[in-house]
Each structure stands twice: as structure tokens, then as C-alpha cells.
Amino acid sequence: MIGDADPEDAYDAGDPISERLAVLVAVVEGIREETDDARRARRRLDAIRVVDAFRDELTVTGTHLRQLRDELEAIT
């Protein structure tokens, strides 16, 4: 993750599920905390897309992914 500006830069669909989930948690935290980031709305929509794709990939709706998506939806 050296040189990455945003936590989402570390997301790699080929990584193990636990690593991908940890990155998504960091993404949600970053979006929530960086309220003055002009890219916030776009980052939030991108994160929702990734969470949905990840959830679809798993074929079973995970509680944690649902919580992450709910948190992203709640960010205004």
C-alpha cells in the first residue's frame, strides 16, 4: 500500500476475501471521515459498486458486506 493516496487503491479482486474486506472497511472509514474531499460522492458510489460486485461474487449475502453498504448509503 506504499504510495497509495486512498485506501481503495489497495483493493485487488484477486486478494483473499479477508484482505478485500479489510480494505473495504478502510474505504468506508475514509469516506466517512474525509467530509471535505471533493471526490467523496464519486468514491462513495465506486465503493457501493465494489461492495455489490463482491457480494454477488460470494453468492451469499454476507452480513458484514450488507453493513458496509448500509454505511455507504447513509453517508451524505
Image (cartoon, rainbow, N blue to C red):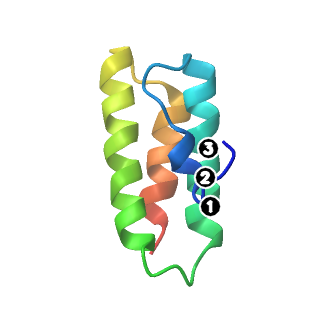
The x and y percentages for residue 22 are 64, 35
Q: Which residue is mark 3?
A: 25
Task: Give coordinates of residue 76: x percent, y percent.
Answer: 44, 75
Q: Residue at x 41, y 62 (%)?
A: 43
Q: Residues within 10 Å of mark 2 (few under 14, many from 20)?
A: few
Q: Do tag 1 and tag 2 residues touch (Cβ < 8 Å)?
A: no
Q: Residue furthest front?
A: 3
Disc 1 is placed on an element classified as helix
Report which residue position mark 1 lands on. Answer: 30
How far, Cα to Cα, is label 3 from label 2? 16 Å
Q: Quadrant of residue 40?
A: bottom left
Mark 2 lies on residue: 4
Q: Are marks 3 and 2 in contact (CB under 8 Å)?
A: no
> Which of pointers 1 and 2 lies earlier in the amino acid sequence?
2
Q: Where is 67 relative to 14, above or below?
A: below
Q: Residue at x 64, y 57 (%)?
A: 29
Image position, residue 58 (x, y; %):
38, 16
Q: Helix, strand or loop at disc 3? A: helix
Q: Against 42, is 50 above or below? A: above
Mark 3, other Cα within 10 Å: few <14 / some 14–19 / many ≥20 = some
Query: Which of 43/9 is in front?
Result: 9
Circle 2: element type: loop
Q: Specify the amino acid type for callout 1.
A: Gly
Distance from disc 3 to disc 1, alpha carbons, whole Å, reads 9 Å
Q: Quadrant of the N terminus?
A: top right
- Residue, x 31% and y 32% (percent of image)? 53
Q: Compare residues 75 and 25 and report the one nearer the observer.
A: 25
Image position of 70 (left or right of 52)? right
Q: Earlier in the sequence, mark 3 or mark 2?
A: 2
In this rendering, is residue 48 above or below 61?
below
